[in-house]
Image (spheres, rainbow, N blue to C red):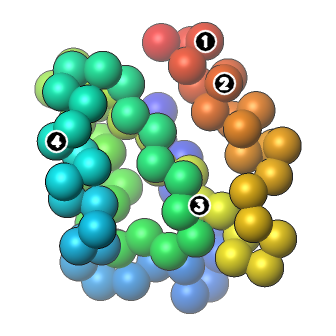
């Protein structure tokens, strides 16, 4: 299950360069990425990880409000469903 950005302007083309090392670091462990800006390919990368048995969640964070309890709750719900 991948949370997808819904805010206009929250997605950019390609990958965020800062996230590439992050995707490799957890190996087979679940990975939740919370950020205020994703590359346009981040949901696809998360889907590929999940399909290969390495669960990934992409969760956009509102850049104006920052990380909120709802963001943490979404990650915790996702982890419980694994």
Residue depicted at 73% across the width and 57% down the height? 67
Calculate the distance from the C-alpha at mark 2 to the C-alpha at mark 1.
6 Å
Q: On the rendered structure, is 70 left or right of 34?
A: right
Q: Secondary structure at mark 1?
A: helix
Query: In this picture, is 60 found above or below 54?
Result: below
Find out whether the residues at labels 2 and 4 contact each other: C-beta distance under 8 Å. no
Dot 3 falls on a residue whose secondary structure is: strand
Q: CA distance from mark 1 to mark 4?
A: 22 Å
Q: Which residue is mark 3?
A: 60
Label 2 secondary element = helix
Which numbered disc, 2 or 4, marks the residue closer to the eye? Answer: 4
Q: CA distance from mark 4 to mark 3?
A: 20 Å
At label 4, counting other C-alpha atoms closer than 10 Å, the crowd grade (few under 14, some 14-19, many 20 or more) is few
User: Viewer-nearest of labels 4 and 3?
Assistant: 4
Tally the marks: 4
Alpha carbon distance from label 3 to label 2: 15 Å
Q: Residue at x 47, y 33 (%)?
A: 1
Q: Which mark is residue 17?
A: none
Residue carrying label 2: 76
Measured as percent of width and height from the top left, residue 23 is found at 24, 46
The answer to which of marks 3 and 2 sits earlier in the sequence is 3
Residue that carries the numbered disc 4 in the rendered image: 24
* Pointer 1 with pointer 4, Cβ within 8 A: no
Task: Give the quarter of the image for residue 73.
Answer: top right
Q: Which residue is mark 1?
A: 80
- Whether the residues at callouts 4 and 3 have beta carbons within 8 Å, the answer is no
């Amino acid at each position: 299950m991948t949370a997808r950005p819904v805010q206009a302007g929250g997605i950019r083309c390609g990958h965020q360069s800062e996230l590439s090392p992050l995707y490799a670091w957890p190996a087979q462990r679940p990975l939740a990425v919370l950020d205020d800006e994703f590359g346009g390919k981040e949901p696809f990368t998360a889907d590929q990880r999940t399909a290969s048995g390495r669960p990934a969640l992409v969760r956009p964070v509102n850049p104006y409000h920052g990380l909120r309890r709802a963001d943490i709750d979404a990650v915790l719900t996702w982890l419980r469903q694994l």
